[in-house]
Image: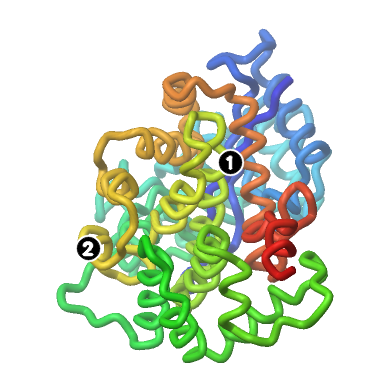
Amino acid sequence: MEIYVARQPIFNKYQEVFAYELLYRSGANKFYSSLNGDEASSEVITNSFLLIGLETLTRGKKAFINFTRNLLENDVAILLPNEVIVVEILQDIEPDEKMLGACKKLKELGYLLALDNFIYDKKFEPLIDLVDIIKIDFLNTDEEERRAVIQRVRSNKVSFLAEKVETMEDFTQAIEMGYSYFQGYFFSKPLILSGRDIPSFKLTYMKILQEINKPDLDFDRIERLIKMDVSLSYKLLKFINSLAFGFRSEISSIKQALVLLGKEELSKWVSLIALKGIGENKPEELIVTAICRARFCELIASRVGLKDRASDLFLMGMFSLIDAFLDQPMSEILKELPICEEIKHALLGGKNRFRDVYDLILTYESGDWEKFTLKAAKLDLHEEEVKDFYLNSLDMSNKIFFKNVSYNDGNVPVACSKTSNLRQRQT
């Protein structure tokens, strides 16, 4: 059975990732291949741990996983390590004695329990005494309901999680109400402050991004900009002198390093580094998601007749969250970036082939499997290969952001996979 897994980050109030909710689908069809949905779900959960691995999916963070009544009563959760999962109890489960017994057993074994899509009802009080986290859907509740549920529960042992938080305003309101955890894409829809200045160090990175995306590269200009940032200069020289390239003599000149990289690979490498600089004081997940999207777009390019535009698709994914990085409207930022019109049109909601790829990625990220199936069919993509592209992208973004090393399938740094070409340029 094919395993499809997407993830959504869960943040604390400091916008640090606390956990990920894992979003599953049992196969390429919209229905379970087994007559028993619980059995199919159980197989997906266990196989995901064994075949994909939590390190790739969650980087050691906790994993929120939905459990049906039958899965809970049949002790399926006990198959998974208690230190890494949060057992999410679905909202339609009746809290009868058998259900409460199953939850008490998990609690005694050290598992964290969460109530999903909670709406207060007196019958849930025995279950509330057992759970650690209660999730409130911010799209389907109003401000009064969101505040009232905390007052009704009145438990110091329970933390509240605001899910489907789509804006910074929602996030700020939830903090004020006493919520501890937050789930949704609020970081991709920033609170725009009119006339807000971009800090000077971020402007330097923006200037570098502008230069490397011009049709005619001015290596002298790029060299001067990079030399203004000691950290960037160090990273470039360390990168070009890594074992992956195997140059016989040390490269000590910024200009020489830039020429050896060439336009396409330089554009990708500098974009990655600059994005991390622009993302300072932003949630780390924002940077990870942007890197993941960039690689995702790049991998899909060759399968949808856009192989020669892979670099542009990489940049589209990279810049898809630039408005959240800079707290400025996307339309204003794109005016300043000399990237191709197809990227700008796609990121502003227009319809073109680039946008089709972008929509596919968004539906996969959110676990909207029905829409994902339609988007994949439109691009004539096999859903199984998209799943593999996603896992490859997660792995790459983890390595870049958390280990400062990125590799492609050939164990060569991703931003510079054309190693042989670079050696030829040097010789």
Identify the disc placed on residue 299.
Answer: 1
Whether residue 126 is visible, yes or no, is no
Q: Residue furthest top?
A: 35
Whether residue 300 is visible, yes or no, is yes
**Residue 11 image point, x, y percent:** 51, 62
> Who's the residue at 39% across and 46% down the image?
137
Relative to 211, does residue 64 appear above or below in the rendering? above
> Who's the residue at 48% across and 73% down the image?
274
Relative to 139, does residue 305 appear above or below in the rendering? above
Mark 1, Cα crowd under 10 Å, few <14 / some 14-19 / many 20+, is many
**Residue 382 image point, x, y percent:** 58, 22
Residue linked to disc 2 = 335
> Who's the residue at 36% across and 70% down the image?
210
**Residue 332 image point, x, y percent:** 21, 64
Look at label 2 and name its amino acid. Lys
Q: Does dot 1 land on a helix, a strand or a loop?
A: helix
Mark 2, Cα crowd under 10 Å, few <14 / some 14-19 / many 20+, is few
Identify the disc placed on residue 128.
Answer: none
Look at label 1 and name its amino acid. Leu
Q: Nearer the viewer, residue 425 or 299?
A: 425
Q: Nearer the viewer, residue 193 or 213?
A: 213
- For residue 383, what is the image quadrant? top right
Relative to 397, does residue 89 appear above or below in the rendering? above
**Residue 6 image point, x, y percent:** 58, 40
Nearer the N terminus, badge 2 or badge 1? 1
Q: Residue furthest front?
A: 427
Q: Does dot 2 land on a helix, a strand or a loop?
A: helix
Q: Nearer the viewer, residue 115 or 48?
A: 48
Spatial CA distance of label 2 from label 1 is 27 Å
- For residue 122, what is the image quadrant? top left
